[in-house]
Image (tube, grey):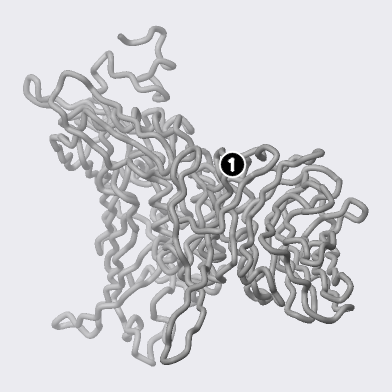
Amino acid sequence: MPATVLLEFSEDDLSDTTPTYVDVTSYCRGIEWWSGIDTEGDEPQPGGAVIRMRSTNRDWEPDYTGGRFYPNVTTYRRFRLTVNGVAEGIFYTTGFEIDYPAGTGYSEVTITCADGFEVLALDNLPLMDPPSADTYADVVAFDEPWGHWRLGEKDGQRVISRVRREPQTVLLGRRRYTIRTKRRYRYTVAGGEIEGSSGPAGSYRSGAPLFGQPGLILGDSATSSTFISGSSGPYARIPVPEDDELSEPNALSVEAWVKRQADQTGYIVAGPLNNTGATEAIFTLNIPDFSDLAIFSVTMSTAGDQNSAGSTTTMSVGTTYHLVGTWDGIKARIYVNGVFEGEQSTFAGRIIDGSVSEYVYIGRHPDDNLFADQTLQDVAVYTYALSPERILAHYNAGAARGWPEQTAGTRIADIVTHALWSEASIQTSGRNLQPVFKHGQPKLEEISESMHAEGPQTLFFFNGSGDPVYLGHEWKATASAYNTVQATFGDGSGEIPYENVELVYDNETFNEVTTNREGGTSFTAEVAGVPRRANSDFTDVLLANDNETESLAGAVLDFYKTPALRPATLTVNGVQASTQIGARKIGHLVRVKRRGQVGGAIDRVTHIIGYRKSLGPEKHLTCTWNLARGFDATLANNWRAGIAAFSEAGQTTRAA
């Protein structure tokens, strides 16, 4: 019997998250829709629909002003499809093609649609400021600091600066000018070379801080260092040459990411002592314990008076803060987490000169022997006053433009968050991924990278309700529909008949798989004793640790190692299997049988990974499911962990 179809159209555009739908079933001449992927291991693919509408009174022509739905027959309007009471999809219009069939008094309009992939494709992730920056360090480098010390060394005594502008003298006409250009160095430190670094480099004194602490920058894999207070440090010291621009500043900025470890005085960074033998540094950024407020001070040339700007935010122990102090020649100002909090301009004049061949100190005051008890990262000093806009850009880059280490599912849920749908069907477990910055990359690209790190059997698609679904690492054990056979298709007694089964000899096999991650170890899994056929597609994945990288190698090998004659697609029609067409979803486990001559029978347990469905003018429903590789149900030793009745857990004895 014909299918019961409800096709609804919304005149509301994407800005309306609760659209009003109108029943337009009577216009529909036919519809085809699809979702999922074609072959297991494919990149995620957009779903969509093609709807043929009988355009009575030219109602579906976009430019016809007399049409019923004018002017809303345009792109990004929504159709909602329900067949036999089952939600089949929400689709967004992308194009219209108009035909005038001979001998008719109406037009026929073919409307192309896409699912939520189209909405995702409209958006990229947020950009850094400047837009060319990919990392937090790029944002800092854009503002040309005098020195930028990430404090992420693994070990050793050398403290490395990322940016340094060195003076060079050039001849222009008859005059000589001193300009500052970036020079790049390569340092060799304990733990290996650091490329792309630049001076001024310094050294850790009185021992070394606790290296390799969790990073304070969201989205950054760089670590921080904890400076533990005591009678002698540790601290970092960076030399300031006599003729350097920092030795006679009249404008400067000091920046750091800070997490207090104890409620006591902590000097974050301090400049050289003044050149008159006084005991004051030309600038300091610290958190005194008497108030728990951050203070930025500059020492003036008039009797050593100080302009000190204090914050209004209490610096709580264990909380991360972004601190910036600036001096523009008139006022000392302090900013906390990108927000201006205080200033002082009581004393006029220039900052007192730094002494000859003195130092910038990190984690210590140069004279008072007051040491930090703080975790520090990305300390930077500038020879001018950063603007409020640039300070906020630095804070946003470090606190709002990245993800921490998290599972692949959680990251994908963060990416696809949208008012148009629910994220409740996103599986948020999975393998752990590295921190990643948001720097304007397409959302779909980042979803694909996250899925790739989980392995070849992950699935991302939009379901019949129009919501995104992610099935990630080990998804087959998460629900009974995924690990228990839901239906058996075949031509035997009690089996569900089908129109056609497409068989392929799947020889996309590998017996050696190499995996690695950025900054990690490379692993190879192999099947010995057979001709070598290697797969190295799973390299530079986003995984956060080596154990999961090694596990991925084994999972990929298990997936690809065995060739098989298998069903690639299965087609059924609504006359014989209408209930199954509505009930079976992507991810469901099914069994496909095919009789054959001796040795030619097929009995395969597999998962649905995609579909294409269609309805003709007579509302006759057909469906073709795309099928995963699966496994042979008749082999006693072909058990699959997590698959009921075909796994160790589903049998009284383990198959050999």
Does residue 570 appear to the left or right of 265 in the view shown? left
Residue farthest to the right, as pictured: 290
Residue type pointed to by label 1: Gln
Does residue 16 appear to the left or right of 354 in the view shown? left
Dividing the picture into quadrants, the one containing residue 325 is bottom right
- Depth order, front residue of 25/439: 439
* Residue 364 screen position, x and y as percent: 76, 50
Query: Residue at 44% across / 16% down in the picture?
Result: 649
* Residue 560 screen position, x and y as percent: 25, 32
Asked whether residue 430 is in view, the answer is no
Q: Secondary structure at mark 1?
A: loop
Query: Residue at 34% across / 28% down in the picture?
Result: 554
Residue farthest to the top, as pictured: 653
Answer few, some or many: residues within 10 Å of disc 1's Cα (few below 14, many 20 plus, some between 14 and 19): some
- Depth order, front residue of 654/580: 654
- Depth order, front residue of 135/591: 135
Where, quadrant-wise, is the C terminus in this rendering?
top left
**Residue at mark 1:** 157
Query: Residue at 18% across / 42% down in the picture?
Result: 499
- Depth order, front residue of 535/451: 535
Residue farthest to the left, as pictured: 597
Vertical order, 534 against 176 (above or below): above
* Residue 474 screen position, x and y as percent: 43, 33
* Residue 578 screen position, x and y as percent: 32, 45
Vertical order, 272 against 156 (above or below): below
Asked whether residue 93 is in view, the answer is yes
Vertical order, 45 against 431 (above or below): below
